[in-house]
Image (tube, grey):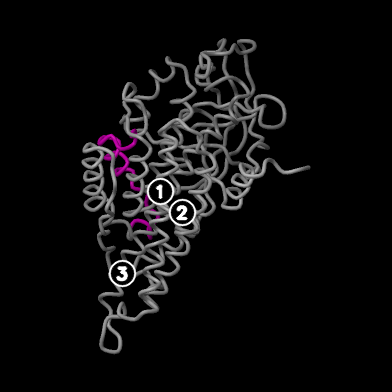
Amino acid sequence: MPDRAPQQVDRQLPTDEARDLISLVRDIAQREIAPKAAEEEDAGRFPREIFGLLSASGLLALPYDSEYGGGDQPYEVYLQVLEELAMARLTVGLGVSVHSLSCHALANYGTKEQRAEHLPAMLGGGLLGAYCLSEPSSGSDAASLRTKAVREGGGAARSGEAGSGAGTGSGGEWAITGTKAWITHGGIADFYTVLARSGGEGPRGITAFLVPGDAEGLSAAPPEKKMGMKGSPTAQVHFDGVRVPDGRRIGDEGQGFAIALAALDSGRLGIAACAIGVAQAALDEAVAYATGREQFGRPISDYQGLRFMLADMATQIEAGRALYLAAARLRDAGRPFAKQAAMAKLLCTDTAMKVTTDAVQVLGGYGCTADFPVERYMREAKVLQIVEGTNQIQRIVIARHLAGPESH
């Protein structure tokens, strides 16, 4: 049977503009995304036309500067848009989050000239981005990546604008060689933000680049066959001497890992919001089923054991939403938020796993069938506990903020 329309979350939004924005997103989600979600996920179909619609509606550019085509929206609002999209279909919500992550490096560390040249098309020109950090042998230990960037011509790079990257450097170009793994939108992206080793071992030898999706020497493996999010292609991306002008280097040489970590702090909030969207969709389905299903002459929602389960699910969702919004408000205020971002990613994705598992239990045998969407939600929730830093990595990040780095 088709997915039910989600219940509307009673959101606290800072402006009338934000309320109008959420209304627009809900309309698109309920008319264009949710009705096809189950069928397209089952078929493994990526909804590229939906991303074209979102781009034309300004929804791929929300947290960025309007000078370059962005929406000037605070993260407090942007994340709630992601949650609404993920409630309708996680492939779309997470895809928007990954696209935003892919724009982060250029938007925050590129030169003014680089931003003017590339950002308008990236934000509102119908393009789709991908973020290339992980590799087959360096997932959680991202600082050990092996993809190499070798400068060819132009001599050593000069430092660029303070805090804004070098970008224009001293001419010449780079040749990038290596393989990236677990890349969302791998093989279909129009541009890739790529982290590659331009110097010695460790985090200080890594540099960031903006690579066109049609660059010669760039190719993708067939998408991974995942347990969830089958409509979202995740693939290895191969770089075989891909030549990139120095003008597409983002930031200074050796600054790439710091750029990557800054992006991931924001990206983790995107994953947290998407997780709460999936959990909310599962709760809505469980409540609808429990209030409509009768056993022993009355709705199963009358039984205390099940009522308590629904109450716990709703409470966990509200707690997760409150945490990701608290972290977003810190970010919007320009205050440190890395610890809270890790906490939000950890709590919200664990909540999604618990809530979706309980939703399957509420539906009983029907919950194990594809006739209802909760089995898909449960498979998707598992993916969210792993992407953009496993939840074990989030615990390491949080503990370092509390007790300092580990002794060696």
Determine whether the residue tagged by mark 3 lies in a helix, strand or loop.
helix
Residue 181 placement (x, y as % from top left):
57, 43
Quadrant in which residue 54 is drawn: top left
Give the magenta part as a residue range: 40-62
The number of numbered discs placed on residues in the rendered structure image is 3
Residue 273: image tag: 1
Residue at horizontal 21%, vertical 52%? 31
Residue 100 placement (x, y as % from top left):
41, 36
Q: Amino acid at mark 2?
A: Cys
Residue at horizontal 55%, vertical 29%? 259
> In this rendering, is residue 151 above or below 45?
above
Disc 2: which residue: 348
Quadrant in which residue 15 is drawn: top left
Q: Estimate how packed mark 3 is, as few (under 14), some (14 to 19) or many (20 or more) residues with alpha carbons within 10 Å.
A: some
Magenta segment includes 48: yes
Left or right? Give the position of 53 relative to 65. left
Residue 93: image tag: none
Disc 3: which residue: 287
Determine whether the residue tagged by mark 2 lies in a helix, strand or loop.
helix
